[in-house]
């Protein structure tokens, strides 16, 4: 049951990413879906076993004392056990990996609920090893096709909107933008700019030698101007030119939302480069 869910879950994750900003890099997850289809016969049994060990087995073990303590009904105890197991792993992921707690616990609950409830039915049947897997393969294919149909319908009706970057005026672009590693960019309304620890295009650019950074970290003053974007340069952004002898003119594109805009640049290989983002910090 865990193996059956995984391809559909992977497809749903890919569909969800289409509503998020991909920063105009990579293949939008299509390569991952292709690999999933090619290698799924080999990976699904192992991944299903892993999910069973992490989610289903702890939920079953937790449901037993709950059932003895409460006296039933069994489905309610198994549901509570599955939710508690998901919350426990979500707490671990939040503390160690800094994942969002609500999203992580919701996803793990969705993964673990059906197998935890279905274990009673599975135990009442006599299954051969081959019988389990060919039925799982058919169910997996049917669920995957159903998910594709639902995703296409949701996209066509606008339930899953495609990401669109915000439209920012020069006045909205001016201000202070900050990023990781202490990067800071101050854009003034008169077209002047000031940078501290800011990544800029390396003189070597895409053809940098192996091991070289795809960008230079620079500080200094310069100028900036809005860039409306074209078919070649992509979405709207800004062109930043620092007068210091460090790095080249760098194009930062607009991302984020109207309430929380971002500037970003991809350095190096456009399909597998280094993504750096700046968030609006104020004036």
Image (spheres, grey):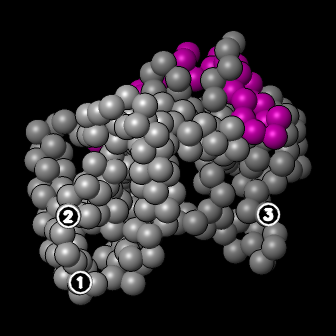
Whether residue 218 appears in this view of the structure is: yes
Which numbered mark, 1 or 3, is in the foreground of this view?
A: 1
Query: In this rendering, is residue 14 above or below 145?
Result: above
Residue at (33%, 46%) from the top-left corner? 113
In front of the other: 32 or 163: 32
Which numbered mark, 2 or 3, is in the foreground of this view?
A: 2
Q: Residue furthest top?
A: 283
Q: Earlier in the sequence, mark 2 or mark 3?
A: 2
Residue beneath disc 1: 128
| Residue 167 located within the stretch drawn in magenta | yes
| SS class, disc 3 | loop
Residue at (68%, 38%) from the top-left corner? 95
Residue beneath disc 3: 213
Instruction: Please state if 242 lies on the left or on the right of 33 as rendered.
Output: right
Query: In this rendering, is residue 78 above or below 29?
Result: above
| SS class, disc 2 | loop
Residue 250, how many percent across, how many down?
67, 48
Q: Residues within 10 Å of mark 1 (few under 14, many from 20)?
A: few
| SS class, disc 1 | loop
Residue 228, how many percent across, how many down?
45, 37
Residue beneath disc 2: 124
Q: Earlier in the sequence, mark 1 or mark 3?
A: 1
In front of the other: 198 or 93: 93
Q: Quadrant of the N terminus?
A: bottom left
The boundaries of the magenta stretch are: 162-191
In three-dimensional space, the C-alpha distance between marks 1 and 3, rounded to whole angstroms, equals 55 Å
Residue 235 location, quadrant: top left
Whether residue 106 appears in this view of the structure is: no
Residue at (19%, 82%) from the top-left corner? 131
Instruction: Please state if 121 lies on the left or on the right of 72 as rendered.
Output: left
């Amino acid at each position: 049951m865990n193996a059956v869910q995984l391809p559909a879950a992977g497809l749903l994750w890919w569909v969800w990413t289409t509503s998020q900003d991909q920063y105009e890099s990579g293949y939008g997850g299509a390569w991952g879906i292709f690999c999933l289809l090619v290698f799924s016969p080999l990976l699904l049994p192992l991944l299903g076993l892993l999910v069973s060990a992490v989610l289903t087995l702890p939920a079953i073990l937790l449901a037993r004392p709950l059932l003895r303590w409460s006296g039933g009904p069994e489905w309610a105890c198994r549901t509570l056990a599955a939710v508690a197991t998901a919350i426990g792993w979500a707490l671990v992921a939040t503390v160690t990996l800094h994942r969002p707690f609500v999203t992580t616990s919701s996803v793990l609950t969705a993964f673990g609920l059906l197998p935890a409830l279905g274990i009673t039915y599975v135990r009442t049947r006599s299954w051969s090893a081959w019988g389990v897997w060919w039925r799982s393969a058919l169910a997996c294919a049917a669920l995957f096709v159903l998910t594709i149909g639902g995703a296409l319908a949701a996209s066509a009706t606008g339930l899953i909107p495609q990401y669109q970057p915000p439209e920012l005026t020069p006045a909205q672009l001016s201000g202070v933008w900050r990023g990781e590693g202490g990067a800071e960019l101050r854009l003034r309304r008169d077209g002047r700019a000031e940078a501290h620890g800011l990544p800029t295009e390396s003189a070597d650019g895409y053809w940098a030698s192996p091991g070289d950074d795809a960008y230079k970290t620079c500080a200094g003053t310069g100028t900036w101007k809005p860039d409306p974007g074209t078919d070649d340069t992509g979405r709207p952004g800004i062109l930043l030119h620092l007068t210091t002898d460090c790095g080249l003119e760098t194009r930062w594109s607009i991302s984020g939302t109207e309430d929380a805009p971002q500037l970003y640049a991809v350095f190096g290989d456009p399909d597998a480069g280094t993504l750096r983002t700046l968030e609006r910090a104020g004036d």
